[in-house]
Amino acid sequence: MKRAIYLTLILFTLTSCVKEFKGHIYDEPGYAIGKVNSTISVTLGVQYNYSYAVGSTEYKGSKKATGINQGELSMIGRRFLVVYKLSEPAKSDINFRYPIYTEQDFLDMLERFKDNPPKP
């Protein structure tokens, strides 16, 4: 039981650190459409590899998600909102809360998040 509590505290701490880092991206946000290209199973989760374009430059990123049954294969090929740092477009976070099915979805999100960026 103590081991489970200890492991939970470590995972919570690591998750908090990741969110804090991503918060810096959300302080200076730019938006793009990201596509999940591949997944890699990792201990207790999955790593999603994605790509997105800013202007004529294509960037790649990755995001780890912890938990069981992440459904990683169903994510390949899907598009989501990517928030990147305006001054450093290679720093990004794909936000799975905001799927993009059409170009209009993306345009609506740009308008929605113009003054108030989404939460990481």
Image: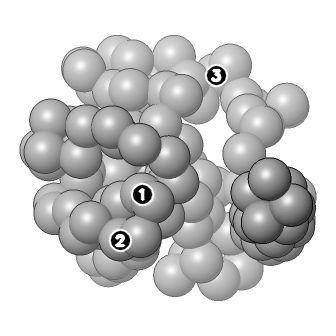
Q: Are marks 1 and 2 in contact (CB under 8 Å)?
A: yes
Relative to 89, 12 lies left or right: right
Can you say whether 33 is above or below 16 in the image? above
Q: Residue furthest front?
A: 1
User: Which SS class for mark 1?
Assistant: strand
Query: 86 or 48, which lies in front?
Result: 48
In the drawing, what numbered circle is on residue 75? Answer: none
Relative to 59, 120 lies left or right: right
Q: Residue at x 52, y 54 (%)?
A: 66
Q: From the image, tell me which residue sits under label 1.
A: 45
Q: Name the amino acid type tagged 3.
A: Glu
- Whether residue 23 is visible here, answered yes or no, is no
Earlier sequence position, callout 1 versus callout 3: 1
Query: 27 or 78, which lies in front?
Result: 78
Q: Are marks 1 and 3 in contact (CB under 8 Å)?
A: no
Question: What is the x, y in percent for residue 71?
Answer: 25, 37
- Circle 1 packing at 10 Å, graded few (<14), some (14-19), many (20+), is some
Q: Name the amino acid type tagged 2.
A: Val
Question: What is the x, y in percent for residue 118?
Answer: 73, 34
Label 1 and label 3: CA atoms lie apart by: 33 Å
Question: What is the x, y in percent for residue 82?
Answer: 49, 51
Label 1 and label 2: CA atoms lie apart by: 5 Å
User: Which SS class for mark 3?
Assistant: helix
Question: What is the x, y in percent for residue 100?
Answer: 33, 26
Q: From the image, tell me which residue sits under label 2.
A: 42
User: Which SS class for mark 2?
Assistant: strand
Q: Residue at x 57, y 59 (%)?
A: 93
Can you say whether 73 is above or below 116 in the image? below
In the drawing, what numbered circle is on residue 111? Answer: 3
